[in-house]
Amino acid sequence: MNDRNAQYDPETGKPLDQSYLECGLPEDLHESILRMEESWNIIDSGRQDNHWDLWWCDLNALINSYEVEQVISSEQAWYLREKYLRMGKE
């Protein structure tokens, strides 16, 4: 799909909407992301999720593993960490 209204970073030429970094992720990584999203929804609503730390650690481990194995790029890994683990890049 060619979106003529898409916004691009003038320095890199990459789309400002970085959701393209989620395309083609391994199925287990995608499933882990879904679990983490559900857990964040519970936490953000003010309730307690007893599995939050399990899902967070699982997703973090998968991202790290796939980055080291070069299944995903470092750019993808940091995008996923920032979006789904709410980590900041120092």
Image (tube, grey):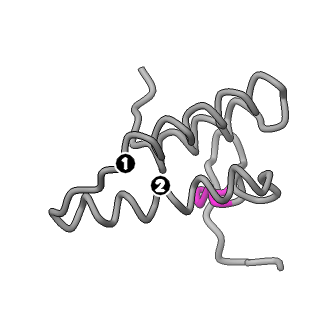
Q: Pinpoint residue 62: horizontal percent, then vertical percent.
A: 66, 36
Residue position for label 1: 52
Image position of 79 (left or right of 67): left
Image: 86 above or below 24: above
Which SS type dominates the magenta stretch?
A: loop
Per the image, label 1 sits on a secondary structure element best described as helix
Image coords of residue 35 (percent x, y): 51, 59
In the rendered image, which residue does mark 2 sit on?
Answer: 36
Q: Position of residue 36 (x, y in %)?
A: 47, 55
**Of the residues shown, which amino acid type is indicated by label 2?**
Met
The number of callouts visible is: 2
Alpha-carbon span between mark 1 and mark 2: 7 Å
Amino acid carrying label 1: it is Trp
Earlier sequence position, callout 1 versus callout 2: 2
Q: Is residue 72 magenta?
A: no
- Would residue 3 appear left or right of 33 to someone viewing this image? right
User: Which of the numbered marks, if any, corresponds to residue 79?
Assistant: none
The structure residue drawn at horizontal position 59% and vertical position 56%, both measured from the top left corner, is 16
Q: Nearer the viewer, residue 10 or 83?
A: 83
Residue drawn at (29%, 56%), measured in percent from left and top? 49
Residue furthest out toward the left: 46
Q: Is residue 60 above or below residue 45?
A: above
Query: In terms of depth relative to the viewer, which is nearer, 88 or 35?
Result: 35
- Identify which residue is drawn at 24% across, 61% down: 44
Quadrant location of residue 37? bottom left
Query: Mark 2 falls on what kind of element?
Result: helix
- Residue 58 at what x, y percent from top left? 56, 39
Looking at the figure, which quarter contains the N terminus? bottom right
